Image (cartoon, rainbow, N blue to C red):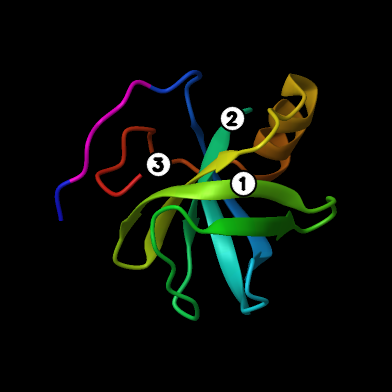
Amino acid sequence: MSRQITPRQTQRRSVALAATWRTQSGLRANCQISDISAHGCCVETKGLYVKVGVRVVIRPQGLEGLTGIVRWVEGPHAGVEFDSPLYQPVVDHLVNLHATRRGVGLEHC
């Protein structure tokens, strides 16, 4: 699937962070956040497929729900733009706790 590439506001950082997400219609599933920045994240799930433009709430382990909108979907991966940017020290803390060794610039995220 081809999608329009738009510049990111901030660099995403690789993580492996368990979470749940819920659509505006109430469907929910377990997921994993594979990269994150203050402005958005890449979510991977095999239990819930969404379309571009759908509003979602993502709840990473240990955090309140983060609201946002799905900006792209490729298979089990979806890019979500947060409604409000995360406080950068929160992003740094999540990366410190859940960082992965793979590099940013992943083909799906």
Q: What stretch is highlighted in magenta?
A: 3-7
**Magenta stretch holds residue 6:** yes
Nearer to us in this view, 91 or 96: 91
Any part of residue 36 in sight: no
Q: Place residue 92 in its image quadrant.
A: top right
By secondary structure, the bulk of the magenta-drawn segment is best described as loop
The spot of residue 52 in percent (x, y) is 39, 55
Residue picked out by circle 2:
39
C-alpha separation, residue under disc 1 versus residue under disc 3: 25 Å
Residue drawn at 49 percent across, 30 percent down: 12
Amino acid beneath label 3: Arg
Residue picked out by circle 3:
102
Amino acid beneath label 1: Gly
Q: Give the numbered dot on residue 68.
A: 1
Of callouts 2 and 1, the N-terminal one: 2
Labels 3 & 2 near each other (Cβ < 8 A):
no
The spot of residue 22 in percent (x, y) is 65, 69
Residue drawn at 50 percent across, 56 percent down: 43
Residue drawn at 66 percent across, 37 percent down: 83
Question: Circle 2 sits in a helix, a strand or a loop, which is it?
Answer: loop
